[in-house]
Image (cartoon, coloured by chain):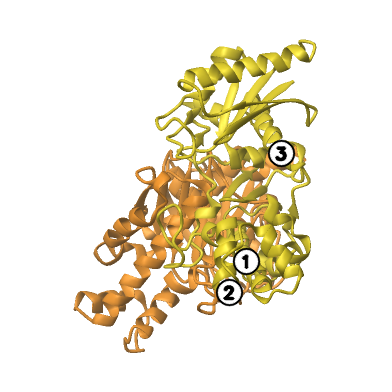
Chain colours: A orange, B yellow
């Protein structure tokens, strides 16, 4: 039994995970606590209640996915979208309260581990998971290990520069993949292609494309081209066997995934052709973050990259 | 004692390596043999002579660096610049002849292992080595392991697309980093910047830049910008602690490395700032390929990624 916790800007979700399934759920507000200690107390209380309600089967580990979380240190580092602007050592705080090993990781890495343990990347030891949403996150798995990098923050595919001197990105630089193929990026592309400025999300653009709106069709065409190049570039780094795309944008099979598969294989360096496939997450959207967090707890608890480093140092 | 072999298009070099130093050398022609078996016989003969001349100290392993070599399979795969146009299982052929474990790897990966074991990346378990020459090669080391990827051909930084729709690349695609920052790429940049078309190598461009030739100075400026972005993009994948540049182009400290360090740190995603350094290979140019090949034999023999996979499968 593993407790997965997904920390969001307004709500934090908890789920008990057994055999790759979420068997019980809870949620608490992220906002409104006196400080991070009170928040950790509330998380631990909710976790304890879930475990008690589940007939007291023993909890083996806790995994926590959060924005700006550093898996090597177990610290949430000054997350702009969370109420605490300083470093919060949440892994240690949860271990202290729940008395089991707790592993903290960033949400994209959690998603990667979730796909690897329970989802469309199960058993694939060289895997790339890309989350397409407000931002573009990624987790690289190489030789059966999540790549954390020397400072614990590897795997930022969304901030590879795709168009030098291109669109402004939220990171303060220009031309990042995220500035083109995220929700915000697609809305910008739609208006650049001559679409009206009243679209609020990708679903609206997709609806218009299906109704033959020229700018919406062009928006998906450009997004496909940029994403194909971004993914082909990622393959040049770690040579994954499979790429799993996660998030609402990737659920547009007709408008995005079908042309993307074609274009990706066309644009791939010849030595990789036929050696990497591209698929969409099969996890339920609601459960994916909880399963990812649980995978973090499970894999981390069994000897993650972080633990291997600690043992060596 | 390890035998390192570096297979080139016209000449193949052999070196006995002990404690990170090449203590004896030999070379044979790559061309002019009846077939690959005769070539392997000639390599083995030269290897045996080196070992005998060295007082018969026991040979522990052989490492072979070659273009288009696949470390997972031990096969040179249809190398366009070698005399054999079919697959050559050279690792097995050398093991048969020399009776010690032989590991075959591509030359850029060999260079990466050489820097990691004996050079400027010694002891750095998250490392990126980039070779700047006729092409742009790379080897990623993650968590103390060379990244081979699922098909044994990971680490092609030179074929990340830097400028979508840009310059034609030798790989048949457009806009690859290699089309900009290799020797050929720099010559193209020089002529694009208005330089005369009579330059044959980067040294000539560097000499002109030092003599205040405007096009040559502009060529180095653009090369610096492109390489800074290419390296910053690589950091987003695996988060190395150090990047080592290898090859004649990188030896232009004043024209390239000094401005490149500045621009690289400027263009780096903020979360990596101060966490990755950029340096130049300190290995002797003549020995580097042999040391790299030897490192392949040493690391491979001790349980490389390839061996770990074989054990698992």
Residues at discs 1 and 2 both on one chain: yes
Q: Earlier in the sequence, mark 2 or mark 3?
A: 2
Drawn side of residue B249 relative to residue B122, left or right: left
Q: Earlier in the sequence, mark 1 or mark 3?
A: 1
Q: Position of residue A96 (x, y in %)?
A: 70, 51
Q: Residues within 10 Å of mark 1 (few under 14, many from 20)?
A: many
Occupied quadrant, residue B199: bottom right
Q: CA distance from mark 2 to mark 3?
A: 33 Å
Q: Is residue B307 visible?
A: yes
> Disc 1 or disc 2, which is closer to the eye?
2
Drawn side of residue B230 relative to residue A201, left or right: right
Drawn side of residue A224 relative to residue A135, left or right: left
Occupied quadrant, residue B298: top right
Occupied quadrant, residue B180: bottom right
Q: CA distance from mark 1 to mark 2?
A: 12 Å
**Residue nearest the observer in this picture, A48 or B61:** B61
Mark 2, secondary structure of its residue: loop
Drawn side of residue A283 relative to residue B239, left or right: left
Residue at image position (52%, 60%) is: B179
- Residue pointed to by mark 2: B193
Mark 1, secondary structure of its residue: helix
């Amino acid at each position: 039994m593993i407790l997965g916790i997904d920390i969001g800007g307004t709500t934090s979700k908890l789920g008990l995970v057994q055999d790759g399934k979420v068997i019980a759920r809870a949620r608490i507000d992220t906002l409104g606590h006196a400080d991070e200690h009170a928040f950790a107390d509330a998380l631990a209380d909710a976790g304890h209640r879930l475990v008690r309600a589940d007939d007291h089967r023993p909890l083996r580990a806790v995994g926590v996915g959060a924005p700006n979380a550093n898996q090597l240190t177990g610290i949430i580092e000054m997350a702009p979208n969370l109420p605490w602007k300083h470093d919060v050592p949440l892994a240690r705080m949860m271990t202290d309260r729940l008395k089991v090993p707790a592993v903290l990781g960033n949400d994209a890495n959690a998603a990667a581990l979730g796909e690897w343990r329970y989802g469309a990347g199960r058993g694939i030891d060289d895997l790339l998971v890309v989350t397409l949403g407000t931002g573009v996150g990624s987790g690289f798995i190489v030789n059966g290990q999540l790549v954390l990098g020397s400072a614990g923050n590897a795997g930022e595919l969304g901030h590879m520069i795709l168009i030098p001197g291109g669109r402004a990105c939220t990171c303060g630089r220009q031309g990042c993949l995220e500035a083109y193929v995220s929700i915000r990026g697609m809305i910008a592309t739609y208006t650049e292609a001559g679409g009206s400025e009243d679209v609020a999300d990708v679903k609206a653009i997709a609806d218009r494309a299906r109704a033959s709106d020229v700018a919406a069709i062009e928006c998906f065409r450009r997004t496909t081209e940029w994403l194909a190049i971004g993914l082909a570039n990622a393959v040049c780094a770690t040579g994954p066997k499979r790429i799993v795309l996660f998030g609402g944008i990737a659920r547009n099979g007709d408008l995005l995934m079908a042309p993307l598969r074609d274009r990706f294989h066309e644009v791939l360096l010849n030595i990789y052709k036929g050696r990497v496939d591209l698929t969409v997450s099969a996890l339920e959207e609601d459960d994916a973050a909880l399963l990812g967090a649980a995978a973090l707890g499970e894999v981390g608890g069994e000897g993650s990259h972080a633990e291997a480093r600690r043992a060596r140092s």
